[in-house]
Amino acid sequence: MNPHASDTERDTTAPQWKTWRDAPPIDRNRALDLLADKVMKEQDEKADARAVLERMKFERNPIDPALTDGAKANLQQYFSGLDADVQQHVAIGSVECRANACQALFAANGIVLVAAGGNVSLPQGPIDITRTVSELTRQPWWSAWGYEIGGMSAEFRDGYALYAINFTRTGK
């Protein structure tokens, strides 16, 4: 789901907390189930041709266990460096790398839908995806591994923000 989609396309039934800090810690199993649903939904939907071609290009190469383990360790290190109250609201779902690209799925809970002039706007929560991606690109391992942002998506469901970040490798 596009985070910039119209109000009717967004999940407006998410639990409402005064702030994301009021939400209970993330239920990792629920987050993983929602991430799996997101992946299955994307595979079932008629995606635009560019997205289908990008996924086919990604899947053409075999999974690279060393890159996958390294990227997952780097992401875990990044998230473990966040404030403790933020950490309890974030779960890494999966990280998969191939020779040319990686995809990381993660979830955050405690999403608060913000009403602006009677309209539901972008949710606020423990993770600001734009800032998070910007901070990831400044990590020492980011350039050492030759990563570049390839795209990202977010979907909001049941009080969870489900994120997919795709990053390509420049061949370093």
Image: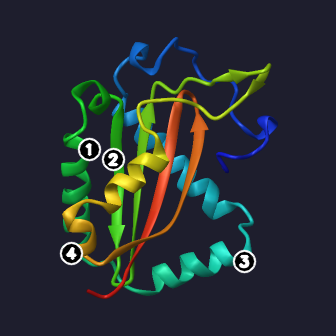
Q: Which residue is mark 1?
A: 79
State the residue in front, 55 or 74: 74
Label 3 – label 4 distance at C-alpha: 32 Å
Residue at the spot of label 2 = 92
Q: Which residue carries the number 3 mark?
A: 49
| First-in-chain label (1 vs 4) | 1
Give above or below for 59 relative to 127: below
- Asked if the residue at tag 2 contacts the one at tag 1, i.e. Cβ–Cβ closer than 8 Å, the answer is yes
Q: Residue at x 42, y 13 (%)?
A: 22
- Badge 4, how many Cα within 10 Å: few under 14, some, many 20+? few
Q: Secondary structure at mark 1?
A: helix
Asked whether the beta carbons under mark 1 and mark 3 sit within 8 Å of each other, the answer is no
- Which of the two residues, 119 or 50, is positioned nearer the viewer here? 119
**Picture coordinates of residue 114 (x, y %)?**
64, 23
- Of callouts 3 and 4, the N-terminal one: 3
Three-letter code for the amino acid on which mark 3 is drawn: Ala
Q: Amino acid at mark 1?
A: Phe
Disc 2 crowd, CA 10 A, few/some/many (<14, 14-19, 20+): some
Q: Amino acid at mark 4?
A: Ala
